[in-house]
């Protein structure tokens, strides 16, 4: 008598897409929706560029497994964009704002920041060749006016002279990797590279220009790492967005360096 074998497909969760077999794979629509459904109870969880998965997939948009996990989905990216526009409005006026995303990924957050911050320009930097090529193709299909460069963010910024009359808004969201522990929270010293080092280096690189940093964070943060980040900045505001179940939400740490509030 033959033995019948049944196989069960692995759960499409953070572990599989970020660290497992699907990490560097271009996901099918079924896999994108399955990740949303099995991890968050919502097949449309990975909505980006103002489109649900079924809509962006039909347009030819494609993402990797790790991008599905690490990208900032629409509901969160739009909230970040609105809050940054509010923050910019309370600061001293500047001629123009250049928004820089050193770890571009899908560029979805940069897309939403540019939607909400009036007159801002966008510069995106991406080290990973596979992610860069997919995102460049996606932006072309959507006709998004974002300059996307391939390479290490620090080397690219060292070689590029930024306009001296611009205020600089950095969206800082390096890969979390093992920096996120669901019990202990996100350690900003263990991201790749560490957020603490990124902010210090950029502050030293642009000492004469008004700087605004927006660091993507988790609902729970490792306290010592948060204190190190806050020590680099003139002022900080921490916001958490209640879009997921309690304990699994993302947030934004907004901080200034050399950019003063408007006079009363």
Image: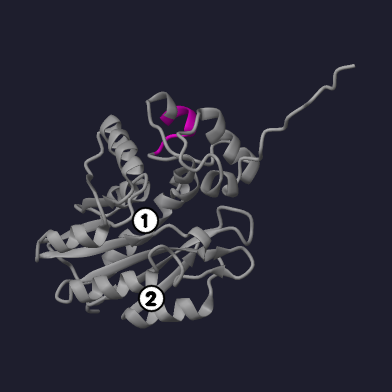
Please say whether residue 40 is visible from this viewpoint.
no
Instruction: Please identify the residue farthest to the front as the structure is shown.
Output: 1
The picture quadrant where one finds residue 188 is bottom left
According to the picture, the residue beneath numbered tag 2 turns out to be 236
Please say whether residue 15 is visible from this viewpoint.
yes
Q: Quadrant of the C terminus?
A: bottom left
Q: Position of residue 172 (x, y in %)?
A: 35, 62
Element carrying mark 2: strand
Q: Nearer the viewer, residue 86 or 247?
A: 247
Q: Residue at x 53, y 71 (%)?
A: 221
Left or right of residue 72, residue 103 in this image: left
Relative to residue 94, is residue 245 depicted above or below?
above
Q: Residue at x 31, y 81 (%)?
A: 234
Q: CA distance from mark 2 to mark 1?
A: 17 Å
The residue range painted magenta reads 50-56
The picture quadrant where one finds residue 102 is bottom left
Q: Residue at x 28, y 68 (%)?
A: 212
According to the picture, the residue beneath numbered tag 1 turns out to be 82
Q: Position of residue 33 (x, y in %)?
A: 56, 34
Q: Position of residue 208 (x, y in %)?
A: 14, 75
Left or right of residue 9, residue 165 in this image: left
Left or right of residue 236, residue 20 in this image: right
Residue 49 included in the magenta stretch of the image: no
Front of the two marks 2 and 1? 2
Q: Callout 2: few (<14), some (14-19), or many (20+) C-alpha neighbours within 10 Å?
A: some
């Amino acid at each position: 008598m033959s033995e019948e074998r049944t196989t069960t497909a692995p759960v499409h969760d953070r572990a599989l897409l970020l660290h497992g077999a699907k990490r560097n794979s271009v996901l099918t629509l079924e896999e994108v929706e399955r990740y949303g459904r099995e991890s968050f109870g919502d097949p449309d969880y990975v909505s980006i560029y103002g489109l649900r998965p079924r809509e962006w997939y039909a347009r030819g948009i494609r993402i990797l497994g790790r991008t599905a996990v690490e990208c900032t989905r629409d509901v969160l990216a739009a909230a970040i964009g609105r809050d940054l526009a509010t923050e910019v409005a309370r600061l001293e006026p500047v001629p123009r704002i250049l928004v820089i995303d050193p770890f571009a990924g899908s560029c979805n957050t940069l897309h939403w920041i540019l939607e909400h911050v009036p007159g801002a320009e966008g510069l995106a930097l991406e080290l990973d060749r596979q992610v860069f090529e997919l995102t460049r193709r996606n932006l072309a299909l959507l006709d998004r006016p974002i300059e996307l460069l391939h390479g290490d963010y620090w080397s690219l910024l060292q070689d590029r002279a930024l306009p001296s009359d611009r205020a600089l808004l950095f969206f800082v969201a390096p890969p979390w990797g093992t920096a996120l522990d669901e019990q202990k929270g996100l350690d900003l010293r263990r991201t790749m590279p560490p957020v603490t080092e990124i902010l210090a280096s950029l502050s030293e690189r642009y000492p004469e220009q008004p700087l605004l940093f927006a660091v993507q964070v988790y609902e729970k943060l490792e306290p010592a790492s948060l204190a190190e980040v806050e020590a680099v900045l003139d002022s900080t505001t921490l916001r958490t967005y209640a879009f997921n179940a309690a304990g699994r939400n993302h947030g934004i740490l907004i901080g200034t360096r050399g950019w003063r509030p408007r006079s009363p």
